[in-house]
Image (cartoon, rainbow, N blue to C red):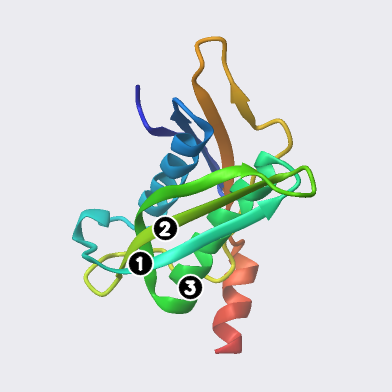
Amino acid sequence: MEKFQLVDVTHNYKTFESFGFSFQEALENSCQALSEILVNEIEKVNCHETLNLDANGSNLEEITEMVLSDLIYSLNENDLIIKEAKTLDFGNNLSGGYFVKMVGHAGSLEETENQKNSQFQISVNPGSIIKNDSGIWKISANLILPTKTEETQVVQQI
């Protein structure tokens, strides 16, 4: 089984799907997929830091979006890319939703070509996480790319 695939690319977004034998594995593979989309030479990243990725939400889509947004935030604010993420704990929270506690092994981007941009956003739509009849989980997510206008505004602000 493949871990993930890029399924659609337009000038506005990149859609990717990740797979796993559990929701947790599919989420870990989503982190890897997003990292590989954002960093062209992910193999050059030497992991030297550990980051916590924790999320609470009312549904699986919400916690997936939170974890992937944290990955983008880490890239933009700390110049760190999470090369590998592992689930430490996952379950139901007291309010009837879900929680996930993950650890990300991260490294700096000094020797890589990357797509650092504070305008990146992630979207995980309702119904985009499914478990098929074979027990395989699939997560579909959209990396929303900045428009040329947004990129120009960022450059002008600097």
**The C terminus lies in quadrant:** bottom right
Q: CA distance from mark 3 to mark 2?
A: 18 Å
Q: Give the mark nearer the N terminus: 3 vs 2.
A: 3
Q: Is residue 107 left or right of residue 149?
A: left
Q: How far from the left and from the top, in percent, is residue 14?
A: 53, 44
Q: Is residue 131 above or below residue 88?
A: above
Counting other residues with Cα less than 10 Å from the Cα at mark 1, is it few (<14), some (14-19), or many (20 or more)?
some
Which amino acid type is shown beneath numbered disc 3? Asn
Q: Are marks 3 and 2 in contact (CB under 8 Å)?
A: no
Q: CA distance from mark 3 to mark 1?
A: 16 Å
**The N terminus lies in quadrant:** top left
Q: Is residue 25 above or below residue 56?
A: above
In the rendered structure, find residue 107 and report the number of the disc placed on it.
Answer: none
Check the image and name the residue furthest to the front.
94
Q: How far from the left and from the top, in percent, is residue 93?
A: 70, 48
- The residue that appears at 71% across and 50% down in the rendered structure is 57
Q: Which residue is mark 2?
A: 103
Which amino acid type is shown beneath numbered disc 2? Val
Q: Give the mark nearer the N terminus: 3 vs 1.
A: 1
The quarter holding residue 91 reads top right
Q: How far from the left and from the top, in percent, is residue 33?
A: 41, 44
Residue 67 seen = yes
Which amino acid type is shown beneath numbered disc 1? Thr
Q: Which residue is mark 3?
A: 76
Residue in the foreground of this view, choosing between 42 and 24: 24
Q: CA distance from mark 2 to mark 1?
A: 7 Å
Residue in the foreground of this view, choosing between 97 and 122: 97
- The residue that appears at 21% across and 65% down in the rendered structure is 46
Residue in the foreground of this view, choosing between 16 and 98: 98
Q: Which residue is mark 1?
A: 50
Q: Give the mark nearer the N terminus: 2 vs 1.
A: 1
